Amino acid sequence: MVKVLFVCTGNICRSPTAEGVFRNVALNAGLGNRITADSAGTHGYHVGEAPDPRSRRAALARGVDLSGLRARTVTAGDFAEFDHILAMDQGHLTQLRRMAPPDARTKLALFLDFAPDAPRREVPDPYYGEGTHFTEVLDLCEMGARGLLEHLRRELA
């Protein structure tokens, strides 16, 4: 089993979208029993809350249901539990590197490192934006999820 954790700031927009999209991609590829995903935030602003309604609506329009997800923060135990911890932007990656215990074996990276053809290297925060920002996040997450799945297929082989 390969475990992936997606991380953004409050765990209500970008990282739950990435989690939901990636779970669907893995499930549709027949790898739902070999790959698991979760999401968390670097800050506890929204712990226990469902993803932002705009994220849920945009994802549901593409067949991805985020309604069962709840925000949580990254914990020290995540660095032992997950094989890959993927940050939505460089600030999150820097923070995760600071949080990681010295003996952590998890692989830290930007999520969009797995989408070399993406028009951006970071998933932008849509929270203060308009509806189109949430669809842009979905587009980027779909690109990242497909690339990540291909990477993990090689890792599982």
Image: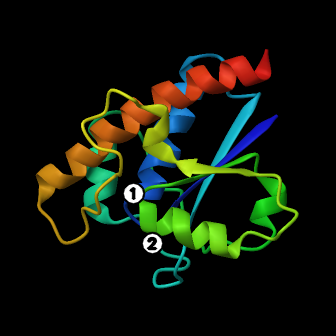
Q: Which mark is residue 95?
A: none
Looking at the picture, tell me which residue is in the foreground, 100 or 142.
100
Q: Is residue 8 visible?
A: no
Task: Please name the residue shown 41% across and 59% down the image.
Answer: 89
Question: Where residue 148 sits in the image (x, y, percent)?
Answer: 55, 31
Is label 1 in contact with label 2 (beta carbons under 8 Å)? Answer: yes
Q: Position of residue 54 (x, y in %)?
A: 25, 59
Image: 148 above or below 97: above
Tell me which corner region of the image, top left, top right, bottom left or bottom right, holds residue 90.
bottom left
Q: Amino acid at mark 2?
A: Thr
> Left or right: where does residue 105 sit relative to residue 107?
right
Front position in the image: 61 or 95: 95
Going from the N terminus, do you reach mark 1 or mark 2 first? 2
- Circle 2: is it few (<14), some (14-19), or many (20+) Cα within 10 Å? many
Furthest-bottom residue in view?
45
Q: Where is mark 1, residue-wise?
A: 14
Q: Residue at x 39, y 57 (%)?
A: 14
Q: Quadrant of the C terminus?
A: top right
Q: Position of residue 125 (x, y in %)?
A: 29, 63
Helix or strand or loop: what does disc 2 sit on? loop
Spatial CA distance of label 1 from label 2 is 8 Å
What is the residue that sits farthest to the right in this orientation?
103
Here the colouring is rainbow
Quadrant of the image containing the N terminus: top right
Apparent side of residue 150 relative to residue 114 in the rendered image (left or right): right
Q: Looking at the image, which is closer to me, 108 or 29?
A: 108
Type of amino acid at the residue the image marks with label 1: Arg
Where disc 1 sits, the SS reads: helix
Residue shown at 47% from the left, 25% from the top: 146
- Which residue was labeled with disc 2? 9
